[in-house]
């Protein structure tokens, strides 16, 4: 394993991250706020350290190996959060580096969990940085890296695979770099469209950008204490719902819809159909529960229930109502949706619906095998037969995901959280949702979590965003055997 090659590209990544801080710096200068100095220092440190690694750690010849790609991906997310925490510390937003790192990791993993007691009291530059960290990571910071820099060669495929593991759609173009560019172009186009619509809805440019930067990556950071509820606008809520739902669909389907003019690829896709059926069904159940359980009007039930179902299922985490005060059935539905998530190949987190489809087909096959062990029942998705290796990998991922939730839940309970808060905090951070229930509910934040618990949740965010295996493989002794 060529550690110098990994450090070489990590240095470039950190330098690019430092350059991205110019956007929040511009807002700080525009509003003449004191956090401008914090961004200047952070830029100097990030770009300086990054270029030093890039210059004095030569990559050598040859493409990155699979192991080197895994190291680069995990190291990239860890270092991005490490340097991304600098503005928070230098601007005085946090007095503990652990808290600043929590906020940065929450941003880069598009989780949306926060430790800020008052969001609106923060300078505009800090608020823009929080939102920008989400947007940069929406389609994957390493995938963006692949799209921007051609020098990675064949190793780019390993990088994208390590950052977006699991069952994905086929490669959209002949070269993985072209695929990354196509996906990011769609992501950028949708972002520009949402900003435009929010401006038409009466939001300021700053609010339109920050809301969009929280919507498209399904992140959930907002520049207000009340999240989207602060705007009290049905039009804004409808725009946000539309783009949250859009962002949780496999972006590969949009490629075929807009570039290839093949709309049937979207509407015949089993995951997309399951996604829409589950979304609509969950909205109807929650609406009925709110009308009968809280006496809410049908209109308000659809407005608030529909928004929260879309927000939670897409793992965005925006809030227009305190769903922690809703009836038990509604809260149970939202908690289940936090685990399920959106589509593979989207910006949504959690298990992903295509894996649920595969698991259901696998369980059905096992049931048939109990009375007909010689039956031949292939597992198909969209007409394509999945190999036993792919199926076993999906089942293993789901099992590992649930086991990780159980272990983290026990750890969070051990640090003093009640069971509801402990379980929902783990599910919300691993699924990159953000708000949970109880002490970490939508009306509060994560300040009630002790320091050790915050460290556990940081790990939950990381393993949840990289879908476990990419991180857990680093704990395998065989991974570190030099070849």
Image (cartoon, rainbow, N blue to C red):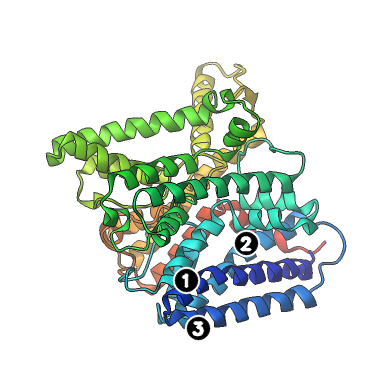
Q: Is residue 429 toward the left or the right of residue 18 in the image?
A: left
In the rendered structure, which disc, 1 or 3, sits on the residue that comes first in sequence? 1
Q: CA distance from mark 2 to mark 3?
A: 30 Å
Q: CA distance from mark 1 to mark 3?
A: 12 Å
Residue 95 in sight in this render: yes
Around disc 3, counting alpha carbons within 10 Å, would you say few (fewer than 14), some (14 to 19), or many (20 or more)?
some
- When the figure is inspected, residue 121 is found, relative to residue 288, above or below; the finding is below
Q: Position of residue 166 (x, y in %)?
A: 60, 43
- The structure residue drawn at horizontal position 48% and vertical position 49%, both measured from the top left corner, is 216
Mark 2 sits on what residue?
Answer: 74
Mark 3 sits on what residue?
Answer: 37
In the rendered structure, which disc, 2 or 1, sits on the residue that comes first in sequence? 1
Helix, strand or loop at mark 1:
helix
Quarter of the image holding residue 92?
Answer: bottom left
Which of discs 2 and 1 lies nearer the camera? The answer is 1
Q: Position of residue 217 (x, y in %)?
A: 49, 51
Image quarter where the C terminus lies is bottom right
- When the figure is inspected, residue 190 is found, relative to residue 429, above or below; the finding is above
Q: Is residue 191 toward the left or the right of residue 378 in the image?
A: left
Residue 459 in sight in this render: no
Along the line of sight, the residue nearer the viewer: 55 or 242: 242
Q: Position of residue 395 (x, y in %)?
A: 55, 39
Helix, strand or loop at mark 3:
helix
Q: Is residue 339 toward the left or the right of residue 51 in the image?
A: left
Q: Residue furthest right?
A: 61
- The structure residue drawn at horizontal position 57% and vertical position 35%, both measured from the top left corner, is 254
Q: Position of residue 199 (x, y in %)?
A: 40, 52
Mark 1 sits on what residue?
Answer: 27
Helix, strand or loop at mark 2:
helix
Around disc 2, counting alpha carbons within 10 Å, would you say few (fewer than 14), some (14 to 19), or many (20 or more)?
many
């Amino acid at each position: 394993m060529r550690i110098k090659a990994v450090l070489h590209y990590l240095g470039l990544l950190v330098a690019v991250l430092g350059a991205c801080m110019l956007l929040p710096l511009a807002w700080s200068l525009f509003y003449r706020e004191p956090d401008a100095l914090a961004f200047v220092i952070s830029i100097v440190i990030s770009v300086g350290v990054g270029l030093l690694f890039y210059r004095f750690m030569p990559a050598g010849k040859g493409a990155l190996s699979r192991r080197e790609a895994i190291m680069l991906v995990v190291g990239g997310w860890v270092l991005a959060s490490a340097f991304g925490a600098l503005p928070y510390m230098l601007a005085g937003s946090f007095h503990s580096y652990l808290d600043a790192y929590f906020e940065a990791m929450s941003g880069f993993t598009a989780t949306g969990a926060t430790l800020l007691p008052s969001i609106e009291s923060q300078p505009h530059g800090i608020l823009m940085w929080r939102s920008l960290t989400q947007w940069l990571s929406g389609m994957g910071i390493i995938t963006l890296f692949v799209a921007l820099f051609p020098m990675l060669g064949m190793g780019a495929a390993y990088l994208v695979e390590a950052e977006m593991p699991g069952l994905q759609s086929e490669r959209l173009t002949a070269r993985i770099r072209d695929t990354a560019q196509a996906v990011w172009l769609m992501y950028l186009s949708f972002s520009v469209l949402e900003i435009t619509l929010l401006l038409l809805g009466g939001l300021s440019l700053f609010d339109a950008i920050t809301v969009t930067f929280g919507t498209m990556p399904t992140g959930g950071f907002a520049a207000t204490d009340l999240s989207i509820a602060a705007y009290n606008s049905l039009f804004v809520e409808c725009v946000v719902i539309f783009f949250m739902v859009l962002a949780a669909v496999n972006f590969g389907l949009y490629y075929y819809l807009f570039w290839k003019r093949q709309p049937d690829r979207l509407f015949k896709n089993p995951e997309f159909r399951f996604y829409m059926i589950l979304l609509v069904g969950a909205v109807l159940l929650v609406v009925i529960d709110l009308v009968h359980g809280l006496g809410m009007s049908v209109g308000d039930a659809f407005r608030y229930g529909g928004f929260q179902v879309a927000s939670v299922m897409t793992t965005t985490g925006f809030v227009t109502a305190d769903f922690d005060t809703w009836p038990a059935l509604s809260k149970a539905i939202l908690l289940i949706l936090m685990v399920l998530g959106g589509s593979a190949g989207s910006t949504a987190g959690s298990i992903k619906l295509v894996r649920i489809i595969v698991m259901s087909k696998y369980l059905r096959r096992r049931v048939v095998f109990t009375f007909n062990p010689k039956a031949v029942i292939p597992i198909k998705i969209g007409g394509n037969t999945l190999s036993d290796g792919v199926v076993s990998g999906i089942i293993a991922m789901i099992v590992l995901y649930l086991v990780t939730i159980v272990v983290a839940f026990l750890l969070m309970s051990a640090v003093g959280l009640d069971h509801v808060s402990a379980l929902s905090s783990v599910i919300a951070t691993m699924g990159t949702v953000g708000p949970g229930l109880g002490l970490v509910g939508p009306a509060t934040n994560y300040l009630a979590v002790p320091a050790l618990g915050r460290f556990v949740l940081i790990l939950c965010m990381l393993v949840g965003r990289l879908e476990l295996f990419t991180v857990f493989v680093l704990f395998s002794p065989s991974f570190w055997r030099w070849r």
